[in-house]
């Protein structure tokens, strides 16, 4: 199984899959290698990439919401799902109000931009198809299941928010800085590894059957657990330090070139 992060890894800086990467991934997929996209976004938001790569066979799945949901591509059925309750976000909401920060809270279908806080930049930053709804924290459904919280702001303001975050809140979540302007608050110990473990188990496999590509903080778990953890040349120092291999740059077909060499594709 080849697991692929999107932004900064498979995608170029202008959010495209290069023709080289597309062709190589289609070849290994046709040869029986399971190609799995791993993202913080919902499947509808990345559906054009799934179609471009032809990942719509009976055994094709996607890791979404940074591991909290595993989706069967061709019918959108859920293989694995783990979320949080509204109450899990109360302390984060209170802190965001105290320091004048925005907050978006996602269930597994839409994004709730919390209207009683500073306006969020997340809808403008988000690339893909998902519904955004403005709603006060008090009006969120107590019975719904939520995948994560997002604080999206200018990078320097997010730096301040991160440094001021109380320890008691930090311990409540698995926090990742997925992009300079985006900080994600996931369930404790939740990352892409969790979804991949469920998917590997579905096929009767384990992490010895996994090759994983990534570039940033939210890829650390899967790269550390994979038999072959591949960091992009443009990845963070932290990611490159724990990887077993460094591939080329995301804007220079780094994924495709490594796979071409590894699988001896002509």
Image (cartoon, grey):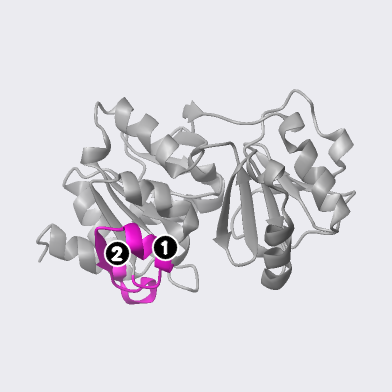
**Residue at image point 27% right, 56% down:** 25
The C terminus, quarter of image: bottom left
Question: Disc 2 or 1, which lies upstream in sequence?
Answer: 1
Disc number for residue 26: none
Of 92 and 197, which appears nearest the observer?
92
In the image, what residue occupies the spot 44% across and 66% down? 8
Circle 1 residue: 238
Image height check: is 68 above or below 111? Answer: above
Residue 106, position as x, y percentages in the image: 68, 42
Give how far across and how far down residue 111 sits, in percent.
Answer: 71, 45
Segment tinted magenta in the rendering: 233-254
Left or right? Give the position of 44 relative to 170.
Answer: left
The residue shown at (28%, 46%) is 226
Verify whether residue 252 appears in magenta: yes
Relative depth, front residue between 17 and 118: 118
Mark 2 vs mark 1: in front: 1
Q: Residue at horizontal 14%, vertical 60%?
A: 262
* Foreground of the two, 227 or 18: 227
Quickly name the residue at label 2: 255
Q: Is residue 259 magenta?
A: no
Say what secondary structure mark 1 lies in.
helix
Residue at the extreme front of the image, as rendered: 167
- Residue 228 visible somewhere in the drawing: yes
Relative to 181, 260 lies left or right: left
- The answer to which quarter of the image holds residue 168 is top right
């Amino acid at each position: 199984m080849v697991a692929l992060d999107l932004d900064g890894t498979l995608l170029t800086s202008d959010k495209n899959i290069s023709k080289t990467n597309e062709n190589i991934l289609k070849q290994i997929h046709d040869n029986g290698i399971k190609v799995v996209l791993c993202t913080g976004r919902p499947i509808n938001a990345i559906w054009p990439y799934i179609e471009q790569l032809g990942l719509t066979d009976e055994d094709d799945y996607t890791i979404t919401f940074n591991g909290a949901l595993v989706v069967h591509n061709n019918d959108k059925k859920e293989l694995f799902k783990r979320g949080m309750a509204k109450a899990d976000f109360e302390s984060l909401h209170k802190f965001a109000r105290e320091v004048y920060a925005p907050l978006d809270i996602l269930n597994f279908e839409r994004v709730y931009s919390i209207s009683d806080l500073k306006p969020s930049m997340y809808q403008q930053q988000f690339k893909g198809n998902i519904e955004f709804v403005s709603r006060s924290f008090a009006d969120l459904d107590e019975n719904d299941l939520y995948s994560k919280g997002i604080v999206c702001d200018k990078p320097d303001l997010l730096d301040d928010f991160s440094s001021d975050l109380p320890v008691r809140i930090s311990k409540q979540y698995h926090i990742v800085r997925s992009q300079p302007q985006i900080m994600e608050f996931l369930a404790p110990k939740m990352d892409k590894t969790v979804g991949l473990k469920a998917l590997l188990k579905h096929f009767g496999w384990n992490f010895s059957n996994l090759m994983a590509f990534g570039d940033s903080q939210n890829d650390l778990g899967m790269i550390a657990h994979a038999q072959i953890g591949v960091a992009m040349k443009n990845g963070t120092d932290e990611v490159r330090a724990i990887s077993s291999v460094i591939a080329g740059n995301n804007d220079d077909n780094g994924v495709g070139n490594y796979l071409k060499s590894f699988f001896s594709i002509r």
